[in-house]
Amino acid sequence: MRDIERLVLGGMVEELKDPRPIETYVRNHNSERERLAGNASAERLRLEAKRDRLEGERQRDIDLVIRYVISEEDAKQRIAELKHERLRVEAELAALKEAPNSISLPPATLDRYIETVNALTDTIASHASAEDERGPLVADFGSLVHSVIVHRKRPLGRLRG
């Protein structure tokens, strides 16, 4: 059993040390951030144009009232509706969320990550040989591993990972 645990742990450590999944995550995160930023930018431009159009219409109606082209009574409701709509659009603009910032991982971060994986490996290994039911850390780690399939290298051969 200890050989199997050692092989499983060794395989998991090698997987955790592989920087490609982390780099893929960063690349996907940044692509999604760029997509969201593009969408947010387009939406912001659309709302700003609508806000400006509504304010322009409101100002034109006010000018028409000032020049006595239309009566104040005729313009009052229309001006109030335009103002209300402009305030709604401004609230939408204020509620627009900024896309998350892009991320990058400096080499020191990956080095620190690998150091952490190595420290975790050492900790698990030291708990694995503990006499008190091999330590609670191993039990917790074991709950992460659903199953292990063992294949013989050759008949009566040694186990391999």
Image (spheres, rainbow, N blue to C red):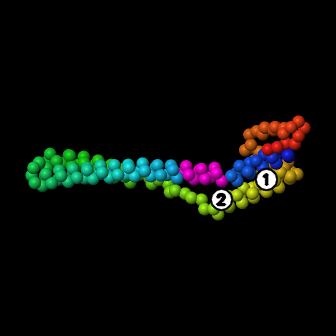
Q: Residue at x 55, y 49 (%)?
A: 28
Q: Position of residue 85 (x, y in %)?
A: 29, 47
Q: Residue at x 78, y 50 (%)?
A: 10
Quarter where residue 67 is shown: bottom left
Is 68 left, or right, of 86 in this rendering?
Answer: left
Q: Would you say the residues marked 1 and 2 are in contact, meaning their CB atoms lie under 8 Å apart?
A: no
The residue that disc 2 covers is: 110
The residue that disc 1 covers is: 124
What secondary structure characterizes most of the magenta part? Answer: helix
Q: Position of residue 73 (x, y in %)?
A: 14, 47
Tell me the magenta residue range.
Answer: 19-29
Report the amino acid beneath label 2: Leu
Report the amino acid beneath label 1: Ile
Is 52 left, or right, of 37 in this rendering?
Answer: left
Q: How packed is label 2: few (under 14 Cα within 10 Å), some, or many (20 or more)?
A: some
Q: Residue at x 50, y 49 (%)?
A: 32
Distance, label 1 to label 2, CA atoms, is: 21 Å
